[in-house]
Amino acid sequence: MQQLVDAFSRKFFYLRLSITDVCNFRCTYCLPNGYKPNGHKSFLSLDEISRLTQSFAALGTEKIRLTGGEPTMRRDFTDIIATIKDNASIKKIAVTTNGYRLSRDVAQWRAAGLSAINVSVDSLDPRQFHAITGQDKFSQVMEGIDAAFTAGFEKVKVNVVLMRNVNDKNLPDFLNWIKDRPIQLRFIELMETGDGSDIFNRFHLSGDVIRQRLLNEGWLHIPRARSDGPAQVFTHPDYQGEIGLIMPYEKDFCVTCNRLRVSAIGNLHLCLFGENGIPLRDLLADDSQQEALQQRIQGGLLHKRETHFLHQGDSGITPNLSVIGG
Ligand code: SAM
Ligand code: SF4
């Protein structure tokens, strides 16, 4: 089996694949005015997704996360899971979702081969949830998380974008919520994107504030596995749940990078905050192109930079995270 390695000896086991830019929510930090179609883009078809993921699997990818936009808005979402599952080398198929379809469909996704779920819930207060997402769907999302447990998922990860004076004061409520639930609650630092400088300047808060509180209250930092995402994970003997912190502005965040991204139109992105992307779609039309596709992916990886340039206020070309999937 080949292995994707970059010029800094980082190995890539993890692909984050966006399958649509479309989203039905209007999160203040992502799509505050809702999704606006940009030209007549067609997103990767089921066959293209199948070829793409086969090539990544042949290059050592073990884990694929489906994201977007809102990935579950694809009508063929269950078929996409099943197609990826057909490849025995992919050990883990995950989704990041706003959760609006969970209660209806999660059992079907699990049967198709989905192995992990991340749901975004920025507030446990229904009114604040509505204000942040533009959707009055807090109860529906909560029912969805319960449905995921009923369907057999042993753990659910919940993403919370940390925002100063919005949800940073809610740590006690979040901790209370995970006391007896196997939820890994992950605070993600707000990231600056092309469209979001104002929001960033107003609401960004370092995850260190949360980390210090956790350490003071007896939480312990645990080590990460090779295909894990970037979260620092903390556990506590009194809690069934865990806390994760994703702090992209912290020094050395990029040292442990193990993931690549492909956008919904088939461009390979070496970094969330990178460049225009390397087109792969012309090599997804036919099975006979697999070798050329693998060579292009490997060749592209040689251009991966050592770190992002967020600290210098350079967020690359990404206008918002729905475009290449957060
Ligand atoms: N629609 C799905 C969802 O919201 O879970 C998947 C796509 S969304 C772009 C993926 C993750 O990125 C979500 O957890 C979202 O909260 C996060 N996100 C979006 N914009 C962000 C930003 N500017 N900074 C930090 N996280 C962001
Ligand atoms: Fe949609 Fe997810 Fe962006 Fe919210 S964060 S607007 S749910 S893509």
Image: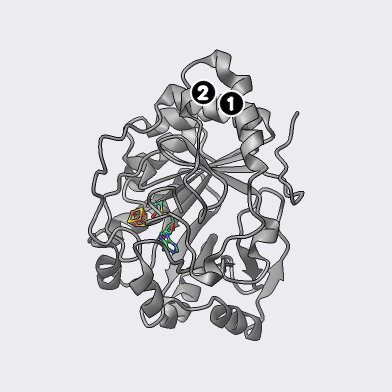
Horizontal side of 102 relative to 34 (left or right) equals right
Label 1 and label 2: CA atoms lie apart by: 6 Å
Tag 2, which secondary structure? Answer: helix
Residue 299 to residue 222: above or below: above
Q: Which is more N-terminal, label 2 or label 1?
A: 2
Q: Is residue 236 left or right of residue 316?
A: right
Q: Amino acid at mark 1?
A: Leu
Q: Is residue 212 above or below residue 108?
A: below
Give the residue displayed 38% in from the left and 42% down from the top: 71
Q: Is residue 90 visible?
A: no
Q: Amino acid at mark 2?
A: Leu
Residue 156: numbered disc: none
Q: Is residue 185 left or right of residue 305?
A: left
**Furthest residue toward bottom:** 216
Question: Which quadrant of the figure has residue 293?
Answer: top right
Q: Determine whether, in the image, residue 241 is placed left or right of residue 27.
A: right
Q: Is the C-beta separation of discs 1 and 2 under 8 Å?
A: yes
Front residue of 242 and 231:
231
Place residue 198 in its image quadrant: bottom left
Q: Position of residue 213 (x, y in %)?
A: 58, 84
Q: How is the image coloured?
A: one colour
Q: Position of residue 187 (x, y in %)?
A: 50, 68
Name the residue carrying label 2: 283
> What element does badge 1 sit on?
helix
The residue carrying mark 1 is 293
Picture layout, residue 74 above or below residue 287: below
Image quadrant, ligand 1: bottom left
- Which residue does the image show at 37% across and 56% down from the upper left? 319
